[in-house]
Image (cartoon, rainbow, N blue to C red):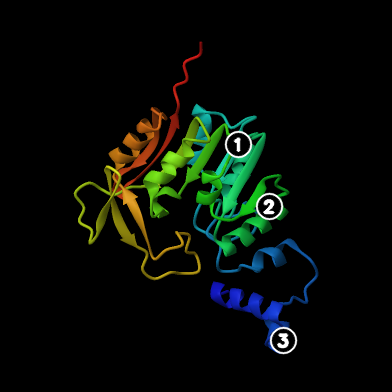
Amino acid sequence: MNIQKLKNGLINLVSGRKHNILQQEHYTEFAPSLENKINIFKGCWVSKLPINGFKEGYSDTFNDDRIYGCNNIYPFMDKNILELGPLECGHTYMLEKLGAASVTSIESNNIAYLKSLLVKDIFNLKTNLLYGDFRQYIKNCHERYDIVVASGVLYHMIDPVQLIKDISKITDVVFIWTHYHEKGKAVKEDSIHGKYKVYKYYYGNITNSFCGGSQPYANRMEREDILDVLKETGLNDITIIGENPSASCFHLLAKRNIIRQ
């Protein structure tokens, strides 16, 4: 199914336009089933859902070694977690399975949010799933979380430096998986955010499985600058859990060293 076609159909359904077409395209005549739910987004799944017979998706977000690696160092058991950009709630599913006390998960892409709601329903997740811009949520947040999970979001930001700084105000622990700009690699545009340089990456053609940012481009940081910003904010106990230099990405756990009196 084409995502734009689905969105147009939802608009038409609400407005009452093209009702004769909608009767054929946006209703089902099959008995209620799990397959019916999944097929609402047939051809658009990114994740491999842990369901027998499910053959879509390419990403193991429901069984991700990066999340297991973080859990080995900093167990999610009994933690209050803020998750940024759940996409299809694969990591959300894992966090609950690993014993999180609570998960608040924020998604700003409306189609990804609808898919996440579907996953939440299928697996009976208890997560507080919110629709909105997590940058605005964090800026106005008065709560503190045991850990913020920021997997696959930093390199989709316009201002990744500020996101790290804002995260540091609401937690003492953050998990990050991100791509970074390879030092020395040529790009057409770069800019300065404070004392850090960021590099502009354009998305190009967007497909049904697009899971990037809201703008036509995003700004990536250099690897060492990511670490330096974390240290600058006080999240200076950093463990590099894994890295793939050929893909210019790594995942890490950063904690604040708190001296107890």
| Front-lying residue, 140 or 21 | 140
Q: Amino acid at mark 2?
A: Lys
User: Residue 209: x percent and y percent?
Assistant: 49, 64
- The N terminus appears in which quarter of the rendering? bottom right
Which dot marks residue 120?
2
Task: Name the residue type under label 3.
Answer: His
**Helix or strand or loop: what does disc 3 sit on?**
helix
- Up the image or down, 159 lies above or below 45; here it is above
Q: Which residue is mark 3?
A: 19
Q: Residue furthest top?
A: 261
User: What's the residue at 53%, 32% (across, down)?
Assistant: 71
Q: Residue at x 77, y 73 (%)?
A: 30
Could you tell me if residue 80 is visible in this image? yes
Labels 1 & 2 near each other (Cβ < 8 A): no
For discs 1 and 3, the disc positioned in front in the rendered view: 1
Instruction: Report which residue position mark 1 lands on.
Output: 143
Using the numbered discs, state the Cα–Cα distance from disc 1 to disc 3 in whole angstroms: 45 Å
Residue type at the position of mark 1: Glu
Q: Secondary structure at mark 2?
A: helix
- The answer to which of 133 and 38 lies nearer the viewer is 133
Number of labels in the image equals 3
Task: Measuring from the top left, give residue 183's x and y in whole percent.
Answer: 22, 46
Pick whichever, 220 or 241, lies toward us: 220
In the displayed structure, does residue 89 sit left or right of residue 37?
Answer: left
Inter-mark Cα distance, 2 to 3? 30 Å
Q: Which mark is residue 226?
A: none
Disc 1 from disc 2: Cα separation = 24 Å
In this view, the residue in front, 95 or 55, is 95
Give residue 69's position: percent from left, percent from top.
48, 34
- Determine the residue positioned at 41% across, 54% down: 156
Q: Are marks 2 and 3 in contact (CB under 8 Å)?
A: no
- In the image, residue 121 sits, relative to residue 29, either above or below, namely above
